[in-house]
Image (spheres, rainbow, N blue to C red):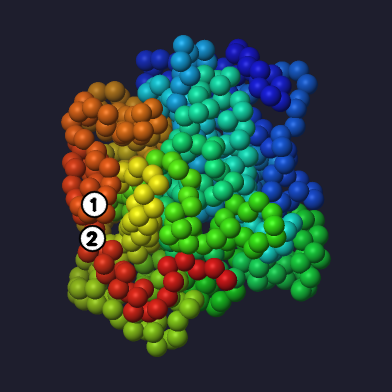
């Protein structure tokens, strides 16, 4: 039993042996970082956390946000009262306060939690950092937007800000340094992380950021007709109105399970093309100006070009075969053989004429689909198209805009490690594709308890775990992922002259100008279509 005093009261945690059985760490789970967002607080910005009497047990995770698990397809009831975080520390009374790593989970802003079923802390904590993982509101609960001062959008991102504030105020009690916090996240967590770099609400709350496989320019991250979508949701649930206040009161009173896995489509093509690589109904929005403290007051591209971003160091990158994950749903690939226009990015679909859309589709198919006979090769080509359209180009666009600000030190990587831990990448074998898929990199940072992956310290995969964790924890500690040559290579800062990057495979391989051809192709596609890289109605 371990008791710690935080601002809201006393917490009872526990000391646990790590999964490699060569050390211990302190665990405090299910800590409330904001008031329960219930009743009239549904859809609104989070309120400060409440205090408690006596000692609060912190040995079990708090509830997850109600959601559809995008991996199992099952609804998880969870609880609207879901604003909890977990703290794991190697030493709660160190001689010098330890670097803090603050993790934001992915899942399309629709699914997931910070719990240790997927995000066991063992590997990172073993490197001498304090790890924080969080839950935040998802889907409509976290991202409904009415374009009103009450519900301007981004409540789930404001949850993350509230969690960061709690960490700044309390993390020293767990041995963490509030002046050395690295925010990192993958997929929708990577999107969230870069938005904190851009947001005025996050200013001063962290010093570094690691953006994994996410960008505000990814199709799946793009907002479109958010206010209209909210009214469509109301209509689907039983209220047809044009009054936002009437709609808000109605939606605040529907049972929470009615707000899980909803499908408020505003354009017919969303019905056919709404796969998880292309579209989610609820995401981050540019907030209308009501004189309030907006999380995202302007389009990401405008903020980046203005240079008015938070002055933090950034690592950004992606995996070698991101969209092997697309094979989770075998029916998705067949849609691409049926409709040409599904190849066209959402930004162009939503802003162009049918003639432009079809012309763009022809150019994309000509570029990617070169084999008309062998179905396996065709599928392999579609996976390449998915990866480059859905992740590589949007991340390269972000990287280049970020480097042009000259406000932050930036590092760029590609993750290519392959072992039994590539749980998604292994889906590609039947299509002749090998590599690291979306999500695979997380298996080398965290121990996913539900997967029962081997943790033998003598295994080849464990060397890759050590290598990847050291790169990220070195960055958290020193602001430099390779402060010396002990990992066998030096990871150079990114610049737009020779564009250095690090390939993170079974060993570290520095290189230059990664995927320049991909960037140039998609730049020309958007230029020819005359469409914006970021959508916002």
Q: Residue at x 40, y 47 (%)?
A: 407
- In the displayed structure, does residue 220 sit left or right of residue 45? left
The numbered mark at residue 521 is none
Q: Position of residue 293 (x, y in %)?
A: 66, 51
Q: Is residue 276 visible?
A: no
Q: Position of residue 342 (x, y in %)?
A: 40, 74
Q: Is residue 22 visible?
A: yes
Residue holding disc 2: 516
Give the mark, 2 or 1, whose residue is nearer the N terminus: 1
Q: Position of residue 128 (x, y in %)?
A: 40, 21
Give the structural element (helix, strand or loop) at label 1: loop
Q: Residue at x 29, y 38 (%)?
A: 420
In the picture, the quarter occupied by the N terminus is top right
- Quarter of the figure with residue 353: bottom left
Of badges 2 and 1, the one in the foreground is: 1
Cα distance, mark 2 to mark 1? 9 Å
Mark 1 surroundings within 10 Å by alpha-carbon count, few (fewer than 14), some (14 through 19), many (20 or more): some
- In the displayed structure, does residue 128 sit left or right of residue 109? left
Mark 2 surroundings within 10 Å by alpha-carbon count, few (fewer than 14), some (14 through 19), many (20 or more): few
Q: Position of residue 66 (x, y in %)?
A: 64, 48
In the picture, the quarter occupied by the C terminus is bottom right
Residue holding disc 1: 499
In contact (CB < 8 Å): disc 2 and disc 1: yes
Residue 118 sits above or below residue 397 on the image: above
Give the structural element (helix, strand or loop) at label 2: helix
Q: Nearer the viewer, residue 436 or 451?
A: 436
């Amino acid at each position: 039993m371990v008791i710690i005093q935080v601002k809201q009261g006393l917490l009872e945690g526990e000391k646990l042996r790590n999964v490699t059985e060569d050390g211990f760490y302190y665990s405090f789970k299910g800590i409330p970082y904001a008031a329960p967002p219930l009743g009239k607080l549904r859809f609104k910005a989070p309120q400060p956390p409440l205090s408690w009497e006596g000692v609060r047990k912190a040995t079990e995770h708090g509830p997850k946000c109600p959601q559809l698990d995008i991996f199992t397809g099952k609804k998880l009831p969870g609880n609207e009262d879901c604003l909890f975080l977990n703290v794991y520390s190697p030493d709660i009374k160190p001689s010098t306060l330890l670097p803090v790593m603050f993790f934001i989970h992915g899942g399309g802003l629709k699914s997931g939690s910070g719990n240790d079923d997927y995000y066991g802390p063992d590997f990172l904590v073993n490197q001498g950092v304090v790890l924080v993982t969080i839950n935040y509101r998802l889907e409509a609960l976290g991202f409904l937007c009415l374009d009103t001062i009450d519900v301007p959008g981004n409540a789930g991102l404001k949850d993350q800000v509230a969690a960061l504030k709690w960490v700044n105020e309390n993390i020293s009690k767990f041995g963490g340094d509030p002046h050395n916090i690295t925010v990192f996240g993958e997929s929708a967590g990577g999107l969230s992380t870069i938005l904190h770099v851009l947001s005025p609400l996050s200013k001063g709350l962290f010093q570094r950021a690691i953006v994994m496989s996410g960008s505000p320019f990814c199709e799946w991250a793009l907002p479109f007709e958010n206010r209209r979508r909210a009214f469509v949701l109301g209509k689907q649930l039983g209220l047809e109105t044009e009054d936002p206040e009437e709609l808000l009161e109605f939606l605040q009173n529907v049972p929470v399970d009615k707000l899980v896995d909803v499908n408020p489509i505003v354009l017919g093509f969303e019905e056919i093309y709404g796969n998880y690589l292309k579209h989610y109904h609820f995401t981050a929005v540019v907030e209308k100006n009501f004189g309030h403290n907006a999380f995202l007051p302007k389009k990401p591209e405008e903020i980046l070009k203005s240079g008015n971003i938070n002055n933090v160091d950034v690592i950004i990158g992606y995996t070698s075969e991101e969209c092997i994950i697309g094979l989770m749903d075998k029916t998705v690939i067949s849609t691409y053989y049926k409709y040409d226009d599904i190849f066209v990015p959402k930004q162009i679909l939503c802003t162009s004429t049918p003639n432009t859309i079809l012309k763009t589709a022809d150019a994309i198919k000509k570029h990617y689909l070169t084999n008309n006979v062998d179905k396996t090769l065709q599928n392999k080509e579609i996976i390449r198209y998915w990866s480059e359209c859905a992740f590589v180009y949007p991340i390269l666009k972000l990287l280049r805009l970020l480097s042009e600000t000259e406000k932050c030190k930036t590092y760029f990587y590609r993750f290519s490690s392959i072992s039994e831990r590539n749980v998604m990448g292994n889906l590609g074998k039947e299509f002749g594709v090998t590599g690291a898929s979306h999500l695979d990199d997380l298996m080398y940072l965290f121990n996913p308890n539900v997967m029962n992956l081997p943790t033998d310290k003598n295994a080849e995969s464990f060397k890759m775990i050590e290598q990847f964790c050291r790169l990220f924890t070195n960055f958290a500690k020193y602001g430099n992922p390779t402060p010396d040559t002990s990992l066998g290579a030096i990871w150079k800062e990114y610049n737009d002259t020779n564009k250095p990057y690090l390939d993170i495979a079974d060993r570290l391989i520095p290189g230059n100008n990664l995927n320049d051809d991909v960037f140039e192709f998609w730049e020309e596609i958007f230029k020819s279509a005359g469409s914006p890289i970021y959508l916002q109605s």
